[in-house]
Image (cartoon, coloured by chain):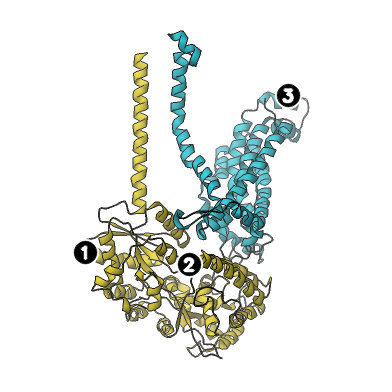
Chain colours: A cyan, B yellow
Amino acid sequence: MAGKKQKVKGTARARSENIWGWLFVLPTMIGLIVLNIYPIINTIKQSFFKTGDFGRGDIFVGVDNYVKVLSNSETWDALLATFKYAIIEVPFSIAISLVLAVLLNRKMRGRSAYRTIFFLPMVCAPAAVAMVWRWLFNSEFGLLNHILGAKIQWVSNPKIAIYAIAVIGVWSIIGYNMVLFISGLQEVPHDYYEAASIDGATGVRQFFSITIPLISPTIFFVCVTRIIGALQVFDLIFMVMDTGNPALQKTQSLVYLFYQSSFVERNMGYGSTIVVFLLVIIMIITVFQMIAQKKWVYYS
Amino acid sequence: MKLRKMMALSLAGAMAVSLGACGGGGGSESGGDGGSGGGDGSLSVMIWDTYQEPGLTEIIGDFTEETGIEAEIQVVTWDDYWTLLSAGAQGGSLPDVFWMHSNEAERYMSNDMLMDLTDKIAESDKIDISKYPEDITELYTYEDKNYAVPKDVDTIALWYNKTMFDEAGLEYPTADWTWDDLYEAAKALTKDGVYGFGCSATNNQAGYYNLIYDMGGYVINDDKTASGYDDPNTIKAMQYFEKMIQEGIMPSQETMSESAEDVLLGSGSLAMTTQGSWMLSAFKENEYIAENCDCVELPKDAASGKRVSIYNGLGWAASADTPNADEAWQLIEYLGSQEGQTKQAELGVTMSAYEGTSEAWTGSADFNLQAYLNMMDDMVIRPYSRETVTWENDCSEALKKGWTQEVSMEEACKNAAAAMNATLEEENAG
């Protein structure tokens, strides 16, 4: 009896483990399917429709929405702004937090206090963070201009607004990256550093020759997730900039544009098309990163 | 073996039950948020203006005392309001009673999201629809059916900083002012980091719309098929603002987008601005404005002699499929009745829509509020169509470029007209 079963599906035990395995991942899977996968499919479907009010009376329009999105200069402005944001946010936040992580990984007084301070921005609600920065950046009454004695329009000059926003982004994400790097650093065996100092390597040399290669998997992980995160920037722009802001057109990100079309102008089909466009871009970039990792990421 | 299996099974069972409980809890919670799940007689009311909340809570308190029906107000910001409301409409969980606005009304009415109040109004002895401004009733009428009872009216007036006028030795603005007088005064008041007058590219209803209609221009034509931004009179009106921008009498669009005109007025950086009556609650609470500022009727246009106020009014609407239909109607009836409307004015919440009840509002604060009532002599309803939000956004996007002088105001107006016409064409085709 048992032998017969084995031929078909392995032992009773393996089969039972199989069932239990599935049962235990089921809650997560249901969550993923209901909250992520189904909406993704629905969004892609919606991008081919001219959507009616309140989800009624959708009309199939083929690739009309895509033609409109891709031929609208607004989309390309938004894509450019999104890239500009990512180009500032990702490298700066990684570089700064990596240095901080190395400094805070040593034995020193008040280490946890410093770690807490740098992690604090992560705990604050993004809306609150944005409101404070909005005041700091205010051209009339802002603290920054008050100190500088200037009248720089940080967030309403189309040339610099996106960089000002990116500074907020860097500030708020440093703590999170830092914690990830610290955990990566703690995996690095101490012997390497000892051997290196005996060989006469300086701290800087150790950092580039030991630390970076050995935590490159962590750097890679942070890099991939941060680029995705940066390309999806929305809340900072939404909170800091008003609709009357002349810099908005050159600063709004793709997700902001999506919000504007989908939820303000209630054109769900057009909005869905924008996020599908963004999805494709993110996927392409991530694929390239996956290919490139073979060149610089060392898995021990 | 058997024991282990049993235990595992009971564990899994417990998990499933707790999951079920989670689902149940979540469900009832979202029902409470959306509001219509209740059925216990407590009404959910949704509004977007925090400043009106205390007054309305008081009025609803009186209503509860009179009828025994409980109701609770929930305030969300203007932007979130429409997101929440449309999600609620799509998911069938609208609040019982809520505000309607001309920008969005048609979308909700044409999709049967709102309760048809026609028969209820006809049977009611408290609501007489002829007592409300016709334009406002019209906003909430679709295919001859009424979907909301008018709540309030709002008009526009000119706010000015008395102290600055005193210091400059100028006479205060009067009801006889023309827009040219305003320009001269604004020019004289612009100095030492103070701007004479402010009106941003997004301030349509309280700002440039008024001057457009004074000068004989228009924003949308009567059958809502074409934009009036390319009308020569409209362009002439907009060039009035262009001149102020060029001469530095007006703060730059950049500045006004970071600190709106009311903020600049309240911080002593702006001498004059036009503001809607709905701003009163905020101005009352601002110490600087209460001490230094006052309001007066808008200026006239010298050539046409016209002094138009754009006006608008909200409506109280109910969800079409609320289980508390009767209670919801009673609340709306109370809020729209002469009694409720008078209270609303007395408490200084807003001017009221019901004929003759707004007089009480003028005494609700220490400003020359009579100006707002006087502005009711010549009113034009805030331009609207089904897709108001879309073309309003496009227009302010185009006009912003005029404000920043990236293009001339004339060109900005023409761009606005083109964008608006495209939207209107699509609207009328579909």
Q: Residue at x 70, y 27 (%)?
A: A193
Chain holding disc 1: B
What distance separates the C-alpha of mark 2 from that of mark 3?
75 Å
Q: Is residue B296 above or below residue A79?
A: below
Chain holding disc 2: B
**What is the residue that sits farthest to the right in this orientation?**
A200
Asked if the residues shown at circle 2 and circle 3 are in contact, with their CB atoms under 8 angstroms apart, the answer is: no
Which residue has dot 3 on it?
A195
What distance separates the C-alpha of mark 1 from that of mark 2?
37 Å
- Please give left or right for residue A128 compared with residue B410 in the image: left
Q: Residue B233: percent from the left, percent from the top?
A: 59, 83
Which residue has dot 1 on it?
B67
Q: Residue at x 25, y 61 (%)?
A: B326
Query: Which is closer to the viewer, label 2 or label 3?
Result: 2
- Please give left or right for residue B91 compared with residue B252 in the image: left
Query: Which is closer to the viewer, label 1 or label 2?
Result: 2
Q: Residue at x 60, y 87 (%)?
A: B184
Decide which of tag 1 and tag 2 comes sooner along the chain.
Answer: 1
Whether residue A235 can be seen here: no
- Please give left or right for residue B229 compared with residue B311 in the image: right
Q: The N terminus of chain A is located in which quarter?
A: top left
Whether residue B341 can be seen here: yes
Which residue has dot 2 on it?
B386
SS for callout 3: helix
**Amino acid type of disc 2?**
Arg
Q: Is residue B262 above or below residue A77?
A: below
Asked whether B224 or B337 is in front, the reply is B224
Q: Quadrant of residue A299?
A: top right
**Amino acid type of disc 3?**
Ala
